[in-house]
Image (cartoon, rainbow, N blue to C red):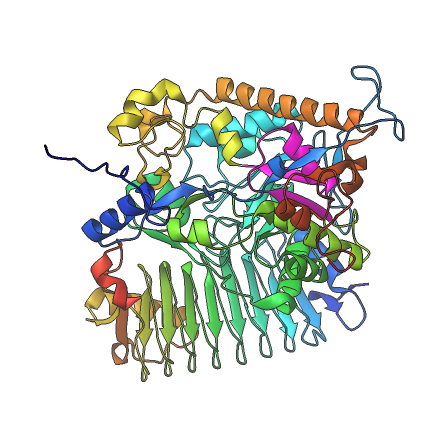
Amino acid sequence: MAETTESARVFDLGKVPLRSLNQALHQVRDGSNEDWEVLNPGGSHSVAVGVDSPVAIAVRGSVGYYCGGMNDGAAITVHGSAGPGVGENMMSGAIVVKGDASQYAGATGRGGLLVIEGNASSRCGISMKGIDIVVGGNVGHMSAFMAQSGTLVVLGDAGEALGDSIYEAKIFVRGEVKSLGADCIRKAMKPKHIERLKGLLEKAGFGDVDPASFTRYGSARKLYNFNIDNADAY
Amino acid sequence: MSHRHPTTTPRQSATFDEYTLSEIRRAAATGIYDIRGGGAKRRVPHFDDLLFLGASISRYPLEGYRERCDTNVVLGTRHAKKPIELKIPITIAGMSFGSLSGPAKEALGRGATIAGTSTTTGDGGMTEEERGHSQTLVYQYLPSRYGMNLRDLRRADAIEVVVGQGAKPGGGGMLLGQKISDRVAEMRTLPKGIDQRSACRHPDWTGPDDLEIKIMELRELTDWEKPIYVKVGGARPYYDTALAVKSGADVVVLDGMQGGTAATQEVFIENVGQPTLACIRPAVRALQDLGMHRKVQLIISGGVRNGADVAKALALGADAVSIGTAALVAIGDNDPHWEEEYQKLGTTAGAYDDWHEGKDPAGITTQDPELMKRVDPVLAGRRLANYLKVMTLEAQTIARACGKSHVHNLEPEDLCALTIEAAAMAQVPLAGTEWIPGRGGF
């Protein structure tokens, strides 16, 4: 069973099944300001998915797939690395990964903030729909593929085909971009972009990084309506 | 005196027939492939190629209108805390709000509810009309994840992970800009008026090992309450069914090539995937090989039109069927009432399939506020309920004639085939023989 200390409800996944943790988190009602602590996640999948209350959850170790999936309001901190799909389809709230993240970080996320302090693998922010993602290191290939809305900030480098088939999402990269995907182009950094980026960096704990050192990328909007003469671009 | 030699009658090519010639001319003029809605229109072996044997001396029938022939089906008994029980083994297939109008979706919900069955969302999220008027609503989990959110996931009665569909196994989708109204755009988080692509692969999993983890996440998200379906197109039904079961599915939905789509390339619809009839037995065999037949339920779709089709699908081993095109026809799609307007669009009632253009005279496959007023959701829902009841009565009639007290008791031994192809696909004897192609070395 879960233990309750003075400061937090503690779930030791070495002792209790994942299902009891998630069910308990789903039963939290509005107004609760309890802190939660998850010990020995041991790479478990689906840790703290579908939490719809503004609680703070500290996960002490690395997690498998889909940690914080569909999160709607919780503040989750992973004191380790995260497997594929961390924060997938996040609605609101915040997820911070202290280590690295595998593929599809923040996939289809609709809101909230996902911070990966280390590197993120391929397809980071794929099909994102409003989430803000800040990556302290590098992102792999096909990141922000078909990204619809939201912001992807990369303090390091980006892999091949960044922003392929991007819609209205915004991408800011401080380092090198190996290549841009279809319909993704470099764009001017206007004061409003620097202002927005500054705020995001501060929220993500990177307030000391100069927003003017980033390059902005976004959609050329040439593939928004099908045209046979653009077929070679696909 | 001059002699006129007799001439031969002008001969049209069977290879370059009238339709083919018109398509070549259309392609040459426009430079783009033909996009349309619906499923395969070509003739393929189908349920029409099977017949029931009926009762005789060796089997006795049940009395119509007197002796019970049950039709209920329970879906999701494998893992879900709250399986779904339907009164009839006919469900309404997933069709998106966006491709269909709001009133059309409402009508589907109303009709399904009256008939005691489920309806299904589509690639565009869940609308209030649909949730409010559907007693049992299956929420599709699609690659695009348009409109996907935690609240709707939890207020669904089941979740259907869509891997593919019969009209286009391996294909994604494209909702063209002309159907993207403010409401559709908002639900899909995209600007109004632009083409909206639906990806062909899920963004955060690939392959059966990942799918197993994804299904587990969906169960954790919903506290293991909801049945999880996996929908596949009729590509490799044996392996797809086996892998869906391995991945933890409660229900497998298998859609043959006659199953419709909102919009896809004609060349895709007509040339990719297998006929529904060819898909059922391999899927059932996969379930049997795994010891999961009747434990993981099988829903068959693609070209189901009447109670005979329902009975045949069940006799081949399905637990239920699903209808899409037929349901749209029941609520008014392609109705001759609008013939004058179909003519103006260069088509005719029964053949109209440019659903992606948003000009549907029947007000069903459109987002035009004026056209969609033509669908009265209450009346159209009643029509769908009537149709579902007729199909159920028809299936019961056949089942009783075969001596079955539940439609699920129908079996392959109740069937014969009219063609060798159908006999081979359905693995039932050719009529008048004991020959099942592929069995006994022949």
Report the magenta residues as a range. B297-323
Q: Is residue B99 above or below residue B248?
A: above
Q: Which is nearer the eye, A93 or B416? A: B416
Q: Which is nearer the eye, B325 or B374? A: B325
Residue B167 in the image: x percent, y percent? 48, 48
Residue shown at 69% from the left, 37% from the top? B312
Residue A73 in the image: x percent, y percent? 53, 56
On the question of residue A145 being in view, the answer is yes
State the count of labels: 0
Q: Which is nearer the eye, B41 or B302? A: B41
Q: Is residue B138 above or below residue A74?
A: above
Residue at the right extreme, as displayed: B58
Q: Which is nearer the eye, A45 or B375? A: B375
Residue shown at 26% from the left, 59% from the top? A223
Is B298 in the magenta?
Answer: yes
Left or right: where B81 falls relative to A126: right
Residue B428 in the image: x percent, y percent? 73, 45
Residue at the top extreme, as displayed: B65
